[in-house]
């Protein structure tokens, strides 16, 4: 896509000789649309959305070997497709091999579920697709998506037809685009909801997802909306987020946050201090997105997220440009969100505003299967529900359950491996895809986490934890599993085994967290020089850490506060 014509005075001014000679950030509004790296060249040559036609008419017919490499490693992402990791390549070779050497001839397909909202028909469709085309794989992500693996290019058009027939899609599930819109899993049903974000999520999805105007952003762009007082969408680590508040004169609406993101340069989002009324929230979202499109940094990929622009500009300038160049008027000042009132993972049985119940259940680190997705759809319908919600914590909710059917549902969920009353570590552990399928990974995460949970459940049976201790495992430095905002965050790397070889392990981050009942504001974890643990020793380390915390904590002290307070030697 070429850059749109910009009408602001600053954007339309010609560049002087001095401006042309300086090293620019590649901002369209200042430096012009000339592409400054290989990815920008690829995007300028052809919009990523256009690759769908080639997939349907050529690549699916002629097979994997017919795929143009620029499409395969670039534009396929605009339709939720990545080649998965070739089996048998250990983590030590991740950084040594080229992408084409790491990749298999099969794809990960990401099904976007905006707001985490599914019907039982949609869930059953995904489950059937998984069993027919994806070797029965299905992972719930911490961004309310469902990921399938082992997908062949020949099957992609048929999968799309089935998804779209029930209102699902993979459009812009990956790439330099607006990714899936996180939404409160209890939107529209919670008795204590401040404002329902569902209409805003639906409007953003309808108007802007798949729209070529916003399909060439500097980098990925993550959105979150919640109107629930638990603040259940990890808003502090999104590029843009709307959090429910009540304005003293204007009533319920949203507080606007921008510039969050983790990866290798973590930064928490900041409030702009504006109040956004629900009826204009989608337009404000589009205004911020266009600002990022035009002013975001495009020269260096590792500086292209919106957090880097905000770090340079600050909130005052960001708000000024947003209001003067994109919104067209000043937005009202607004209040900050109040402290969360309860857990945002929604596990357990809860009353809806209409007297029915919603039931939140926990799989193990998001791993399910197509067979279990189908069985879950059947179970939900058998108790009178036709609505499912996914959460940003790798959990699943069944909505609209009559009180008299709750016990039968809970028993059925247990048989599917979905616990409504999980152990603390099963409830609060998440893991990314890891070495099994991800080309960036260095270590296994899903199996390592599953084994660690089982061992910790055995060792710490009967130990009371009155505040949660979150455990997040990531297979590489990119922090898809949000390691910097966990009580115990683990970044995958290879460690020396003492005999000249290497074994899978993790660098340890301690004391991170997002705003919660037990924490006023979000904060990043601390790293301690040389603090690393092998995957094999992970249960030993976590058990030792938990027991030290319980022995040494002050009254009412959370794990995060304790981890930041005590001497480093205690944490080793």
Image (cartoon, rainbow, N blue to C red):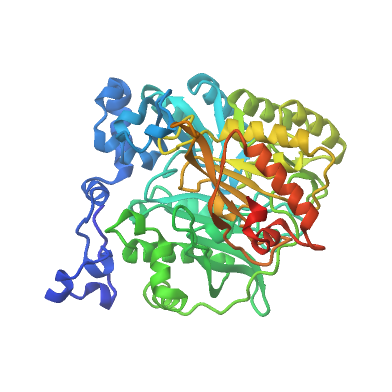
Q: Is residue 424 toward the left or the right of residue 475 in the image?
A: right
Query: Whole-percent x and y of residue 343?
Result: 73, 54
Query: Whole-percent x and y of residue 185?
Result: 65, 49
Query: Whole-percent x and y of residue 425?
Result: 71, 41
Most extreme residue toward the front, as rendered?
A: 499
Query: Whole-percent x and y of residue 446?
Result: 57, 33
Viewer-proximal residue among 361 and 467: 467
Q: How many marks?
A: 0
Q: Is residue 80 toward the left or the right of residue 40 in the image?
A: right
Q: Is residue 558 toward the left or the right of residue 3 in the image?
A: right
Q: Measuring 49% from the left and 23% from the top, which residue is drawn there? A: 134
Q: Could you say which quadrant of the image residue 544 lies in? A: top right
Q: Is residue 401 toward the left or the right of residue 74 in the image?
A: right
Q: Could you say which quadrant of the image residue 34 lies in? A: bottom left
In this rendering, the answer to whether 257 lies above or below 551 is: below
Q: Measuring 30% from the left and 21% from the top, which residue is drawn there? A: 63
Most extreme residue toward the left, as rendered?
A: 17
Most extreme residue toward the right, as rendered?
A: 404
Q: Can residue 306 be seen in this view?
A: yes
Viewer-proximal residue among 343 and 349: 343
Viewer-proximal residue among 461 and 401: 461
Viewer-proximal residue among 484 and 148: 484
Q: Can residue 167 be seen in this view?
A: no
């Amino acid at each position: 896509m070429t850059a749109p014509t910009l009408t602001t005075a600053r954007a339309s001014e010609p560049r002087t000789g001095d401006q042309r000679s300086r090293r620019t950030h590649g901002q369209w509004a200042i430096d012009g649309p000339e592409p400054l790296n290989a990815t920008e060249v690829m995007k300028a040559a052809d919009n990523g959305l256009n690759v769908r036609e080639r997939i349907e008419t050529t690549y699916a017919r002629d097979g994997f070997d017919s795929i143009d490499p620029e499409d395969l490693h670039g534009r396929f992402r605009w339709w939720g497709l990545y080649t998965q990791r070739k089996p048998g390549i250990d983590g030590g070779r991740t950084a040594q091999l080229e992408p084409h050497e790491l990749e298999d001839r099969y794809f990960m397909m990401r099904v976007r579920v905006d707001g985490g909202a599914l019907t039982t028909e949609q869930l059953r469709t995904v489950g059937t697709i998984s069993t027919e085309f994806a070797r029965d794989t299905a992972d719930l992500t911490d961004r309310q998506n469902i990921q399938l693996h082992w997908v062949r290019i020949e099957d992609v058009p048929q999968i799309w037809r089935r998804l779209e027939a029930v209102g699902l899609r993979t459009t812009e599930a990956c790439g330099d685009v607006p990714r899936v819109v996180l939404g409160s899993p209890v939107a529209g049903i919670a008795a204590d909801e401040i404002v329902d974000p569902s209409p805003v999520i639906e409007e953003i999805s309808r108007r802007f997802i798949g729209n070529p105007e916003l399909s060439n952003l500097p980098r990925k762009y993550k959105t979150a909306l919640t109107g629930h007082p638990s603040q259940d969408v990890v808003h502090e680590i999104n590029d843009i987020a709307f959090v429910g508040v009540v304005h003293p004169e204007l009533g319920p609406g949203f507080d606007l946050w921008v510039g969050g993101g983790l990866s290798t340069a973590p930064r928490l989002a900041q409030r702009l201090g504006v109040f956004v009324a629900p009826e204009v929230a989608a337009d404000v979202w589009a205004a911020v997105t266009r600002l990022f499109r035009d002013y975001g940094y495009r020269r260096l990929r590792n500086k292209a997220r919106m957090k880097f622009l905000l770090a340079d500009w600050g909130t005052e300038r960001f708000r000024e440009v947003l209001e003067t160049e994109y919104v067209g008027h000043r937005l009202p000042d607004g209040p900050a969100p109040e402290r969360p009132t309860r857990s945002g993972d929604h596990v357990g049985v809860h009353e809806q505003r209409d007297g029915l119940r919603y039931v939140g259940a926990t799989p193990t680190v998001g791993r399910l299967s197509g067979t279990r997705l189908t069985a879950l759809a059947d179970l939900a319908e058998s108790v009178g529900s036709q609505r499912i919600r996914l959460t940003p914590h790798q959990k699943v909710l069944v909505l609209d359950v009559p009180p008299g059917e709750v016990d039968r549902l809970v028993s059925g969920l247990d048989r599917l491996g979905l616990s409504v009353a999980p152990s603390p570590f099963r409830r609060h552990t998440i893991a990314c895809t890891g070495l099994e399928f991800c080309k960036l990974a260095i270590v296994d995460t899903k199996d390592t986490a599953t084994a660690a949970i089982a061992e910790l459940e055995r060792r710490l049976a009967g130990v009371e934890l009155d505040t949660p201790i979150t455990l997040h495992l990531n297979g590489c430095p990119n922090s898809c599993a949000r390691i910097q905002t966990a009580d115990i965050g683990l970044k995958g790397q290879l460690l020396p085994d003492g005999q000249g070889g290497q074994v899978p392990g993790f660098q340890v981050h301690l004391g991170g967290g997002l705003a919660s009942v037990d924490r006023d504001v979000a904060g990043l974890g601390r790293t301690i020089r040389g603090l690393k643990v092998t995957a094999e020793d992970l249960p030993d380390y976590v058990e030792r850490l938990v027991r030290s915390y319980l022995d040494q904590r002050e009254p009412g002290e959370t794990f995060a506060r304790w981890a930041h307070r005590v001497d480093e030697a205690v944490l080793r």
